[in-house]
Each structure stands twice: as structure tokens, then as C-alpha cells.
Amino acid sequence: MVAIACFYLYTNFNSQKYNWTENYYDNNDQPYGTLLIKKILEHNCTPKKLTTLTGNLDKLKELDSTGYNYIFIGDYQVLSDDEYNTLLNFIYNGNSGFISANYLDKKLEFFIDSNLVFRDYRINNKIVSANFYDDALKNGNEGYQFYKKWRTEIDNIPWQYVPDSLYDIQKLAYIDNSYTNYFSFKYGKGSLYIHLAPIMFSNYHLLNEKSVAYAENVFSYLPPNKDIVWDEASKYPFVTRENKEYRAEKSALYYIFSKPSLRAAWYVLLLSGVCFLLFTAKRRQRAIEILEAKKNSTIQFIDTIKYLYLKQKNYKVINHHRYKYFQSFIRNKYSIIISNPTDDLYRKIALKSNYDEDKIRELFKFFLTIGIDDSIHDNLIEKHTNELNNFYLHATKNN
């Protein structure tokens, strides 16, 4: 059985054609790479050129003119202090910057608004409708549909937006009718454009004509006829150029999952571990003997004493115990001490217990009558018992 399961896992994972991980690498032709959007931008900026930054952003220091559009599309942007200052200076001098990320660099978030935590503003939906505030770019009421697909399923994921309290920005696009997820603001002589859903520019969505139209409308806000500087350097994990190829510093597990045979071996190892736990979890020592719990016979004892008193018709003793308990109950629950029953006492108990004052007076009358009269019959005792139980039940329900 284990061998069959291992064979199934191996063949199943080998048959997977696509990698559904969001990495947004520009040389990645998988669903969530950015190969297509980079080619579209490169085509549209002709005869201008597109320059790719790798390793770091030092190249921006050499571009001292104002004819550039900086573009970053990735899951997580990470900037060193020097890169952060270089980027802001680049924009301040008159260039434009476009950043689309699920997680902006912390320093950049603080720069936009020091009191705003971007990840506090999210909506969780499987499918969102994106559209523009500009009627000339708006796709009617339908908008542009986007979602996160994982193999054959559509995931319910968080979609970020910015609150209306964010001031000094120009709102450009939104999702689900009211949540702004694309905005810009001036900085020095340049402008910075922030888009909070990079998945909308992935290879998967750009296979759809409407999504291509959406992407072109998004980038139409950037100044035209400018060279493009594509940032591949500040994506996380960091990407560097080595032997004319991109190399990402990834974890060992990432490497295992990138190779079909290693991935199958990993799942076989996990399955073997589960089987080991299942077959070795059985108790190997002698079972502990189950001892029968001792029964609590307190209630039976009380019932025995009660029937003993009733059989002897010793109502004065019963009444004495009842009255003592009644006094204790009133004192503990309503902080009223009973000494001599008076109309004022009845009124206080009635107000605090929300119980009829005449019925309370009758209770005390029963107590006093039974205490001095030896000719009490069973019907009166039963009536008094019912009235007393009604009072306790009412007091318990009205805490």
C-alpha cells in the first residue's frame, strides 16, 4: 500500500506542468512571473530602451537626466538604506517611479504615511473587480476581473487598499467599487505611483485581452516617451546576476520543490513518517486498570433525612431549618438582615428581588404560623413549600 501511494505521488507531482508560486521574476514564463508585462512595456517604449537593474540600484545614480520611468513589480520589495535614498533622490530630481507590490519596503511605507500600516487595510475575496476613477479608462460597471488561481482552485486571498484618510494623493484606480489600490503623489519634480496588487500584471492574467487593457491603462498614467528602468534587484529574495544568468538566494526547501524528483522524494519521506507514527503509536505497556469512581451519596442522604422528618410530622424542626436558610439566602443575595419582620422589610425584599410584596408577606406569615402552631396539616406545608420554591426560582433567574 505504501509503495502504491509513493508511486502515485511521484507520478502525480511529475505531471504538474506549472509552478504557481508568486515570484514575479522577469525571466519566468510560469503563471506568476512577469515575463509578459516586461515584454509589453519594452515594446510600447520603442524607440526608447528598457534597462534592467540587477544586484543593486547604484545604476540610478548614473542616470542624472529626467527621462526615466522606474518600474518595480514583485511580491516583496526590500531596499537598503542607501537604495532607499537613491530611489527617492531619483524621483525627486524629476523622474517617475511605479511600484506594485504585496509588501512595500517598510521605509517606503513610513515615507508615504508614518501612521499607516498598509496590511491593516485588506478585503478577503476570491474575485475582485478593478476599475479606474477616470471615466475615459473605466470599463463600465463590470470593471476588470482578477483572482488568484492555484492549480485548479481559486484562492480566497487578501487584497490591499488604502483608506480614504490618506491625504495628498491622487486616486487612480480601485477594487470592488470603493477600495483604492492605485494612487500617486508628487515628490519634488517627479511622481511616485503605488499599485497594491502585482498579481494583476502576472503572466496568467495577461493572457486575457481585458487584463492587458487594464495594464496598459495603469501604465498610461506614467509620462510617455521615457526610457524604462526595470528593477529586478530589490525583489525578495534578492536576485543577482552570475554567469549571465539570474540566481536567487533561496532556501533548501525551495530547491527541493523546484525539482520534480526531489519533490516526490520529499513527499515520500513525509508519508513514511506518517505511516511510522500510525503503526508505532499503539500502546506497548500493560493497560492501566480503570477504577470505578466513588459515588456521591449526599443527595440520597438529604432525601432520607427529609422523609424522616416528614414521616414524623415534625414540621416545627423543618420550618426552623427552612427559615434559617431563607434568612441566609436573603442576607447573601440582597444584603438584607432579617431580625423582626416588618412592612418595611417586606418592601425592601420585594424591591431588590422584583418579587410580589404580598407573596413575600405570605411567606413570612407561613414561617411564623408553622413556628407556633402545632396543628399544622400537610396541605399547608405543601403550599408553603411551593411558594418558597417559586421565590427561589424567581430569585435565581433574576440575578
Image (cartoon, rainbow, N blue to C red):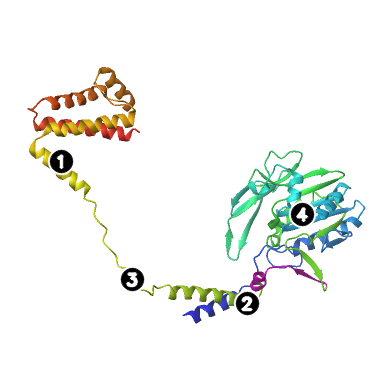
The total number of labels drawn is: 4
Question: Residue 78: image x %, image y %?
Answer: 75, 57
Q: If you read the primary sequence from the N terminus, does the residue marked by circle 2 or circle 4 appear first?
A: 4
Between circles 2 and 4, the one closer to the viewer is 2
Between circles 4 and 1, the one closer to the viewer is 1
> In the image, 180: left or right of 376?
right
| Element carrying mark 1 | helix
Would residue 18 be visible to someone looking at this image? no
The residue to which callout 3 is attached is: 287
Residue bounds of the magenta highlight: 244-257
Between circles 3 and 2, the one closer to the viewer is 3
For the residues labelled 2 and 4, say whether their Cβ atoms are less than 8 Å apart: no
The residue to which callout 2 is attached is: 262
Q: Residue at x 8, y 39 (%)?
A: 311
| Element carrying mark 3 | loop
| Foreground of the two, 46 or 170 | 170
The residue to which callout 1 is attached is: 306
Cα distance, mark 4 to mark 1? 89 Å
Q: Amino acid at mark 3?
A: Ala
